[in-house]
Image (cartoon, rainbow, N blue to C red):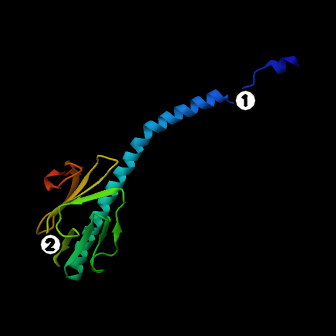
């Protein structure tokens, strides 16, 4: 009987072992958190670009379908994509607040207009970015035919926007 009392029990962890494990987990979390935030921001920027493209293409299609001019407004202050005419955009889209919209499109509220043939009278560039990533996506539309392209924006995160900094990526 005395033998059983002197045996060491292996049924749990000591307080020191638990503290060491928590410190190691904290260090791993501190290293991984910035990478996770950057990934989340890149996903938000990519999603914003898809929303922008979808809204612009929808507005162009509806202009041709209804045989009338349509305009899509891109508000960098509220991150809202909308149209003043219900026949030009089926619903208003809101881009994530963490995404920053910069553009060189003219107008008090930057906009793109399409004729009944799907042509546009404006050309311009829209850049989407976030404070938590260096990833910048861009959208460029040309005058006349309204040819569109997207890519990675290589210019500064501040200042004016230029289509020459929108580098198309070959897939």
Left or right of 53 on screen, residue 144: left
Upstream in sequence: badge 1 or badge 2: 1
Can you give x and y, in whole percent of width and height, for residue 57 in the image? 25, 68
Q: Which residue is mark 1?
A: 11
Residue drawn at point x = 27 percent, y = 63 percent: 76
Tell me which corner region of the image, top left, top right, bottom left or bottom right, holds residue 104.
bottom left
Can you give x and y, in whole percent of width and height, for residue 169 in the image? 21, 50
Decide: marks 1, 2 in contact (CB < 8 A)? no
Can you give x and y, in whole percent of width and height, for residue 120 in the image? 15, 71
Name the image quarter holding the N terminus.
top right
Crowdedness of circle 2 by 10 Å Cα count: few (<14), some, many (20+)? some
Front one among 109 and 146: 109
Determine whether the residue tagged by mark 1 lies in a helix, strand or loop.
Answer: loop
Give the farthest residue toward the left.
Answer: 144
Front one among 151 and 117: 151
Image height check: is 13 above or below 155?
Answer: above
Q: Which mark is residue 119?
A: 2
Front one among 65 and 36: 36
Residue drawn at point x = 21 percent, y = 60 percent: 103
Determine whether the residue tagged by mark 2 lies in a helix, strand or loop.
Answer: loop
Image height check: is 162 above or below 28?
Answer: below
Q: Which mark is residue 80?
A: none
Crowdedness of circle 1 by 10 Å Cα count: few (<14), some, many (20+)? few
Residue drawn at point x = 29 percent, y = 75 percent: 89
Left or right of 106 on screen, residue 25: right
Give the farthest residue toward the right.
Answer: 1
Image height check: is 102 above or below 135?
Answer: below
Can you give x and y, in whole percent of width and height, for residue 38 in the image? 37, 46
Give the farthest residue toward the bottom.
Answer: 67
Residue drawn at point x = 62 percent, y = 31 percent: 18
Mark 1 and mark 2: span between their CA atoms? Answer: 75 Å
């Amino acid at each position: 009987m005395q033998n059983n009392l002197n045996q060491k029990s292996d049924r749990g962890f000591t307080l020191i072992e638990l503290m060491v494990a928590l410190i190691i987990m904290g260090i791993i979390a501190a290293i991984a958190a910035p990478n996770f935030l950057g990934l989340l921001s890149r996903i938000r920027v990519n999603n914003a670009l898809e929303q922008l493209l979808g809204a612009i293409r929808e507005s162009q299609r509806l202009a041709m379908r209804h045989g009338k001019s349509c305009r899509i407004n891109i508000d960098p202050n509220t991150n809202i994509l909308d149209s003043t005419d219900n026949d030009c955009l089926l619903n208003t889209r809101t881009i994530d607040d963490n995404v920053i919209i910069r553009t060189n499109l003219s107008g008090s509220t930057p906009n793109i207009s399409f004729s009944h043939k799907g042509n546009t009278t404006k050309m311009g560039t829209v850049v989407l970015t976030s404070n938590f990533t260096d990833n910048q996506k861009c959208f460029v539309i040309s005058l006349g035919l309204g040819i569109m392209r997207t890519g990675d924006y290589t210019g500064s995160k501040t200042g004016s926007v230029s289509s020459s900094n929108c580098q198309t990526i070959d897939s």
